[in-house]
Amino acid sequence: MKCSKDGEFTEGELTRFGNIQLSPSAGVLNYGQAIYEGTKAYRKENGKLLLFRPDHNAVRMQLGAERMLMPSPSVDQFVDAVKQTAFANKRWVPPSSKGSLYIRPLLMGTGPVLGLGPAPEYTFIVYASPVGNYFKEGTSALNLYVEEEDARAAPGGSGGVKSITNYAPVLKALSRAKSLGFSDVLYLDSVKKKYLEEASACNVFVVKGRTISTPATNGTILEGITRKSVMEIAVDQGYQVVEKAVHVDEVMDADEVFCTGTAVGVAPVGTITYQDKRVEYETGDESVCKKLRSVLVGIQTGLVEDTKGWVTCIN
Ligand code: PMP
């Protein structure tokens, strides 16, 4: 779908996956004017495809577009494009025990712009790829490294939206952590370097007794759709859920830590390394993480009744 700066998006069309043509002076290439979303289609046991809360991705894209001074498709246009892409790729969707279809809506400034400013034209594309389960054989928990050198987002910046410009700056810290054998980086706030933010592409929760805390969304972390859903499931299950500033000492003193996101699902954290300390956490079948995970994944894959109206069946 295409649109000029203030206009409406035109009807889109389904095409085969392939390269696209861009002007060398496209806004996205020169000034990073682009935002994206990530969602998944799951194959139910009876073969039907399920989407999880795609309208929430649509609304998040609209908020991101506003921050990055871009027009955005309507919620209906967005959801319809996601549904059509999933449906057109249905033969590639593995059974949910093996994986899912990852769907990537991408909105970018494709019009030419030389001086710094918003692009005169925008393109909205949705593409998809089958993906396996997050944890490879032999691993079942994340081992995180608390990053103190590089920050993910600064107050007033674009950390609260899914701008493409948030991701390249974290590649250095991520590859450094991976080369040391960690699965991901845990970011602290960029001002005091003491308060938990999030990992490279997932939100973080800290469990102590029956209280589950997670960093409040104050513009520097992404308001995850999995985060929001897991918080609601946890409240239903009688946990106390608190959004607040979570001090790194609280993280190191927790019973459990877990991450949430479209890619990771609800993933237990096995260890966290901060300065010269390394803490191991509860990750067993009785853990809070595993209990919340089984409800969420059950709803997403159609094994648990969707009493909340979170899933959309598309065939
Ligand atoms: N934080 C960041 C930085 C992310 O990229 C993602 C992935 N979208 C998340 C959190 C988790 O968000 P969601 O649950 O909507 O996938």
Image (tube, rainbow, N blue to C red):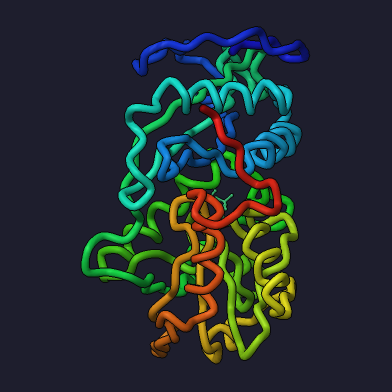
Quadrant position of the N terminus in the picture: top right
Q: Residue at x 56, y 38 (%)?
A: 37
Q: Residue at x 71, y 79 (%)?
A: 238
Residue 5 occupies which quadrant of the picture?
Answer: top right
Q: Residue furthest front?
A: 46
Q: Residue at x 51, y 78 (%)?
A: 257
User: Eyeballing the image, is 29 above or below 133?
Assistant: above
Percent of width and height locating residue 42: 45, 42
User: Eyeballing the image, is 218 above or below 4?
Assistant: below
Nearer to the camera, 74 or 51: 51
Nearer to the camera, 37 or 95: 95
Q: Can residue 273 be seen? A: no
Residue 111 occupies which quadrant of the picture?
Answer: top right
Nearer to the camera, 126 or 24: 126
Percent of width and height locating residue 298: 51, 57
Q: Can residue 229 be seen? A: yes
Percent of width and height locating residue 7: 76, 11
Percent of width and height locating residue 135: 32, 61
Q: Residue at x 52, y 21 (%)?
A: 84
Does residue 155 appear to the left or right of 252 in the view shown? right
Nearer to the camera, 240 or 176: 240
User: Eyeballing the image, is 314 above or below 123?
Assistant: below
